Amino acid sequence: MKDTEVLQSLVDALKCLPGVGPKSALRLAYYLLQRNRKGADTLSQSISNALEQLGHCKLCNDFTEQEVCKICSSQKRDVHTICIVEMPSDLLMMEQTHSYKGMYFVLMGRLSPLDGVGPKEIHLDRLIERIKSSEIREIILATNFTAEGNATAQYIKELLKGAEIKMTRIARGLPMGGEIEYIDSGTLAQAVVERKQL
Ligand SMILES: [Zn+2]
């Protein structure tokens, strides 16, 4: 590869990051090469390690180095309750409340037909299988209080209609349009306690 081609391929690679267009990609490339070669090296190693070692937990779909993650293999959790969240960061927030001891399922997104995200992309087939293959008595829908989060909760509720499982939605101490990732753990803990039956 010619010099310019090497640089161009780095710029093109950086464009895979969300919100990074050609100009910012070029700026990032210059920054890494000129100002922070050590950081760039650590970054490239970390990305390659993460890609190699991290997969999805076969039960909750969160990222893990094991086949089954720590939470799912813990003996101390309530296996009859499952909390459905959009992203791993939401699971972390739920854990920080210390008020929830059940299991999880991480959708890795939310329904968003305009962006091409349908039921398959958020792994609903796996969720249904997960619920069918275990003795779940309560499903807590803890998707965000955004239009898409609400639609996703509604869709899952419809999907499981007829199953004899209690369905609840975390309560709205959360602001409308609110994302779980950005609220304090006290408010989230309260929202879990005050969850409403659907
Ligand atoms: Zn898991």
Image: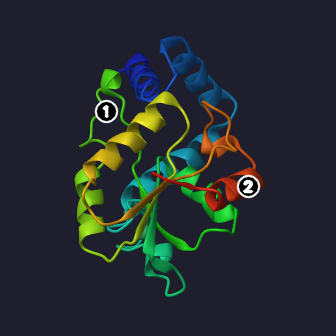
- In the image, 3 versus 48, the foreground residue is 48
| In the rendered image, the vertical position of residue 159 relative to residue 96, given as above or below | above
| In the rendered image, the vertical position of residue 23 relative to residue 69, given as above or below | above
- In the image, 88 versus 54, the foreground residue is 88
Residue at horizontal 36 percent and vertical 20 percent from the top:
2
Whether the residue under disc 1 has CB within 8 Å of ligand 1? no
Q: Is residue 183 visible?
A: yes
Residue at horizontal 52 percent and vertical 22 percent from the top:
19
| C-alpha distance separating marks 1 and 2 | 29 Å
| In the rendered image, the vertical position of residue 11 relative to residue 129, given as above or below | above
Residue at horizontal 60 percent and vertical 18 percent from the top:
27
How many C-alpha atoms fall within 10 Å of the one at disc 1: few (<14), some, or many (≥20)?
few
Give the amino acid at mark 2: Ser
Residue 24 appears at what percent x and percent y?
Answer: 57, 17
Disc number for residue 117: 1
Residue at horizontal 43 percent and vertical 52 percent from the top:
48
| Residue 66 picture quarter | bottom left
Q: Is residue 65 visible?
A: no
Chain-order first, disc 1 or disc 2:
1
**Quarter holding ligand 1:** bottom left
Q: Which residue is mark 2?
A: 185
Taking the image as shown, residue 19 lies to the left or right of residue 126, namely right
Of badges 1 and 2, the one in the foreground is 2
Give the amino acid at mark 1: Val
How many C-alpha atoms fall within 10 Å of the one at disc 2: few (<14), some, or many (≥20)?
some
Dot 1 lies on which element? Answer: loop
Dot 2 lies on which element? Answer: helix
| Residue 52 picture quarter | bottom left
Taking the image as shown, residue 126 lies to the left or right of residue 4, namely left
